[in-house]
Image (tube, rainbow, N blue to C red):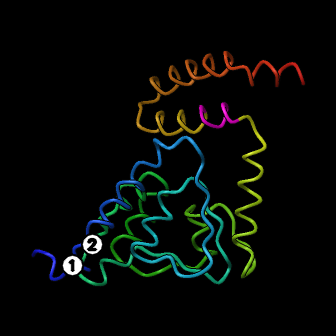
Amino acid sequence: RPPADPWEERFCADRKQLYRAILRNADFFKPVVAAINGHALAGGAEMILSTDLRVMSSEATIGITEVRRGLIAGGGSLVRLARQIPWAQAMELALVGEPVSAERALQVGLVNRVVPAGDALAEAQRLATSIASKSPATVKIGKRAFYEQREMGLKAAYDHASAVMTENMMARDAEEGIGAF
């Protein structure tokens, strides 16, 4: 159906633009770190699943809950889930639609760290600061290689890793790092 009013029309346009940006995180050269302090449900979970690293408050929840409303998750989370966590866990999240606790999210691999309530943003900033202290060129090359090799077969991925290593060794940051070591 067409949008009912100008607000709904704007919402639909903004949502498409947001999802396009989210789906292209693999093309964004800087790591994206999420801090989850509350409920990341439906569209919130879609955004979280598009990030590279995730820190979650012990009191937070995450869930692909669209199925509970007769909808399918449309922002890429079904694609991401199957690539990020074990198949059976991804299917349960997608088909049952129940939010999971922070501990469960950590257990199945949805998040990197669980911290006490209220500490997620500070921990995500510490993680981002740690990454930022590394060679920008190496982080960029590493993130790109990680996303590219994920779509390849094993032999192609090893060949790609070798090519990326050569590219990295040609970077000035690698030369300085080896010299400092």
Please identify the residue farthest to the left as the structure is shown: 1
Res 167 → quadrant: top right
- Residue sitting at x 68%, y 79%: 58
Indicate the secondary structure of the residue bearing disc 2.
helix
Q: Nearer the viewer, residue 126 or 112?
A: 126
- Residue sitting at x 69%, y 18%: 169
Calculate the distance from the C-alpha at mark 2 to the C-alpha at mark 1: 6 Å
Q: Residues within 10 Å of mark 2 (few under 14, many from 20)?
A: few
Please state the extent of the stretch shown in magenta in the rendering.
136-141
Identify the amino acid type marked 2.
Arg
Instruction: Look at the numbered discs 2 and 1 and tell me whether their residues touch, using CB distance below 8 Å.
Output: yes
Instruction: Specify the quadrant that holds the C terminus.
Output: top right
Q: Would residue 143 be found to the left or right of residue 6 on screen? A: right
**Label drawn at residue 68:** none
When the figure is inspected, residue 3 is found, relative to residue 169, above or below; the finding is below
- Residue sitting at x 45%, y 77%: 41
Q: Nearer the viewer, residue 173 or 164?
A: 173
Percent coordinates x, y for residue 40 in the rendering: 50, 76
Residue at mark 1 = 6
Percent coordinates x, y for residue 138 in the rendering: 67, 31
- Residue sitting at x 29%, y 74%: 11
Percent coordinates x, y for residue 79 in the rendering: 36, 55
Q: Main secondary structure of the magenta part?
A: helix
Percent coordinates x, y for residue 26 in the rendering: 47, 44
Q: Residues within 10 Å of mark 1 (few under 14, many from 20)?
A: few
When the figure is inspected, residue 167 is found, relative to residue 139, above or below; the finding is above
Identify the amino acid type marked 1.
Pro
Instruction: Specify the quadrant that holds the N terminus.
Output: bottom left
**Label drawn at residue 10:** 2
On whether residue 4 falls in the magenta region, the answer is: no
Please identify the residue farthest to the front as the structure is shown: 6
Indicate the secondary structure of the residue bearing disc 1.
helix
